[in-house]
Image (cartoon, rainbow, N blue to C red):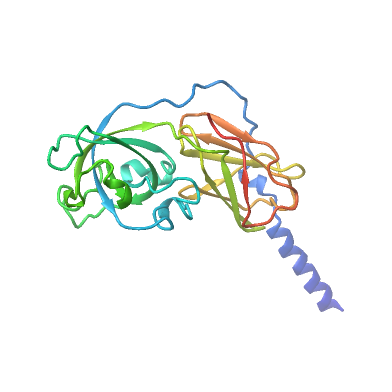
Amino acid sequence: MASTLQALALTLLLIALVMHDCHAHGNLVVPHKHGHRPNFKPGPWKQAHATFYDGGSGSFGGACGYEDVVQEGYGLNTAAISSVLFNNGQACGACYEIKCVDDTQWCKPGQPSLTVTGTNLCPPNPGQDSNNGGWCNPPREHFDIAKPAFLQIASDYKAGIVPVQYRRVPCVKQGGIRFTITGNPYFNMVLVWNVAGAGDVDSVQVKGDDKLKWTSLKRNWGQKWVTDCMMVGESLTFRVRASDGRYSTSWHITPKNWQFGQTFEGKNFK
């Protein structure tokens, strides 16, 4: 009998440890006070270079956590960006207008522009010179464009690498911000995608309709955000802050009985 009681006590202790108050670990946040901020505007033109790389809709979003860039609305106009631009995943989802310039042999006539979304990382290659193969080495700002999109600015794949001008531009999306929840009750992972405006996200918060108070998620990688707070069984509200400081709050977009693997649509930026 004593051993049974000890086993029960140990089980209850383990459950209590797992079901800890996550708010005691610095995850609880003060509710946001709304203030007006202007819509995201195009930035200044800058100099860079562009190459292209092979892949498909399921691989062009690798380092940002996007599962399929076509199904998730980014299309194939995407780019892997150098680590200086990638900024440890902060720039995932940002949109760039790119023009091939100063190369009459390989740039398309008229300098047509291409708008791409940063969906992947072009990693540095320390073994190669920055001007000969190490195109994405710091401090270079570089775009490794998905191969299907490269010929929108260059005349031939033989170009290899072309000089470009680029600038940040607002992202235009259909519908609301999407939140795909995966993981398990003790490790919730939320992929945030289809973000308009600035496109990139620098903070995510979640709130339930019962026990779960406003809680900050942590960036796991790319645009995948995690928390060990108990989200199961609550109607969830998500608040997203973009890199331009604007907030979007999507109130109660899930039912109480939501399931892992589901995607929910919230309010987008204009």
Q: Residue 122: x and y, percent?
A: 31, 51
Q: Residue 254: x and y, percent?
A: 69, 46
Q: Quadrant of the N terminus?
A: bottom right
Residue at the (41%, 53%) spot, across then down = 63
- Front residue of 93 and 8: 93
- The image shows a total of numbered marks equal to 0
Residue 43 vertical placement versus 144 (above, below): above
Residue 113 vertical placement versus 221 (above, below): above
- Name of the residue lying farthest toward the right: 1
Q: Residue 89: x and y, percent?
A: 42, 46
Residue at the (44%, 45%) spot, across then down = 74
Left or right of 169 on screen, residue 233 = right
- Front residue of 102 and 255: 102
Residue at the (19%, 39%) spot, across then down = 107
Left or right of 218 on screen, residue 29 = right
Left or right of 2 on screen, residue 138 = left
Q: Quadrant of residue 153?
A: top left
